[in-house]
Image (cartoon, grey):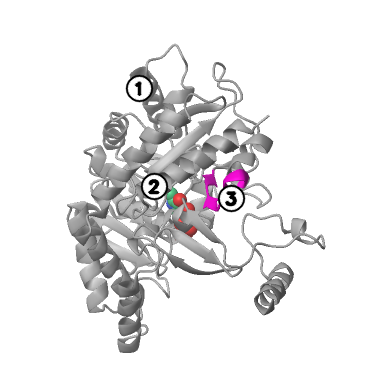
Amino acid sequence: SAMAEEVMELQNKQAASLWHPMTQQRAWNAKEARPPAPVVSSAGSRLQRMDGSTMLDMIAGLWCVNVGYGRREIADVAHAAMVELPYHAPTMGSPQQIELAAKIGELLGMEAQVYFSASGSEANEAAFKIARMYHALNRDDPAGALRYKIVSRQRAYHGNTAGAMAATGQAERKIGFGPQPPGYVKVPPPYPYRRNPKLTPEEHVDDVVRQLEDTIVYEGAETVAAFVMEPIISGGGVLVPTSSYLPKVRAVCDKYGVLLVLDEVVSGFGRTGAMFGHQHYGVKPDIITMAKGLTSGYMPLGATAVDAKIFRKFDGCDGVAVPPHLAHLRQINTYGGHPVACAVALKNIEIIENERLVDRAADVGDYFVKQLEEHLLPLPYVGEIRHKGLLVGVELVANKDTKEPLPETLSAKVPASCATDGIIVGRNGTTVPGLANVLIFAPPFVVEKPDCDLVVASLKNAILALP
Ligand code: PLP
């Protein structure tokens, strides 16, 4: 048919011209092989390809389409905003930008100053610079300019730009990209499933918190600017900490004057069943970064929210280590706080609030996990199911007693099998052994319970078909 020909033509152009991320495109060179048909439309939790096939998107794009696809009211707001004011320099303020900054502070429940960028990586880069400069300007710590190190965690993902990549704790994101920027130090995250079996989960948490403290001490606390962490490690395999971890981390940071930066790029805006991930744990961070769910992916936008106590240090011209004419945030993104993106973010947040989607994420997440536990946990290879809200991980193991990770070749078969059922399932990591065995689910919050049942059935088939 004409459509089939059109699809094929685009597939050929795609193979010849479009560089896909995270993809070995050599596989498409073979005559009979083709890149997937392009995606053209969407609604709710589903995407449609040009060849007419539909896919239930259990990863919400890249964990970002929180309110679901096809929200016409967001498109209308974007259209109106663009007609009115397609762009303004970030040094100016527009009503939508100002309202969004105030709204973010309200949702965080803190007096915060918000710096806008255009992505999660940039939000983290800004956070690191703000943390370093805060110390340099901190009149209460005359040696503050010595603080530049960023401590982060193994298995974390913080982005693809130099600093965010250096803070990332996944080797496969860095191999082949040359030396990393200095000043980035890693500590282990809590991982109760793979803890030393001689330790209780609580002793395990104490052990990893002690390693954080030891690292700060041995690096020289006066050289450490910030500790950055995702409340729940997402791309690194959905590692959910016990509830005591974050408060204990906060205490260590306070003891050594280290700022606590929380990367809420995935966990923000309802994903975990609270508006922000850290709100489960009763701590007050110093800096919070966000992107993704801020606009549900409808427009690119990143934000770095900074506690007013930190922000106030930037008011002086008598900084200890920074010349007065440089004592302000010297950081700008052309597209930071784009007025159309801010208008979209405000509408997106309004939808999340009006439709009580945060509660829905918690409710559907609990339902989905209950089904997974009932139907998958008894199967071979299913080691552990972890979740908070609609952030769900299923860890596959070769042996349930030894917990040896299921090899990459087998783990990869599960999402591939689900794809033939029209279901998109995520998986962590790519190349490092033992890092690629967690199936990941982060669907739109509008996903229906019957959709979850379809996913469970498809997973069960896939796992039972493993050799
Ligand atoms: N932080 C976390 C926790 C993420 O998962 C991501 C992206 O997946 C980022 C930061 C980077 O965001 P972006 O891809 O918008 O730069």
- The answer to which of 430 and 450 lies nearer the viewer is 450
Residue at image coords 53%, 39%? 459
Please state the extent of the stretch shown in magenta in the rendering: 416-427
Q: Tell me how far mark 2 sits from mark 1, CA to CA.
A: 40 Å
Residue 417 in the magenta stretch? The answer is yes
Q: Residue furthest toward the top? A: 198
Q: Quadrant of residue 201?
A: top left
Q: Which element type, helix, strand or loop, lies under badge 3? A: helix
Q: Tell me how far mark 3 sits from mark 1, CA to CA.
A: 41 Å
Marks 2,3: beta carbons within 8 A: no
Marks 3,1: beta carbons within 8 A: no
**What residue is shown with label 3?**
419
Q: Residue 243 appears at what percent x and percent y? A: 29, 30
Can you tell which of label 2 and label 1 is closer to the viewer? 2
**What residue is shown with label 1?**
206
Under mark 2, the amino acid is: Pro
**What residue is shown with label 2?**
450
- Image vertical order of residue 155 relative to residue 4, above or below: above
Q: Is residue 236 visible in this depiction of the protein?
A: no
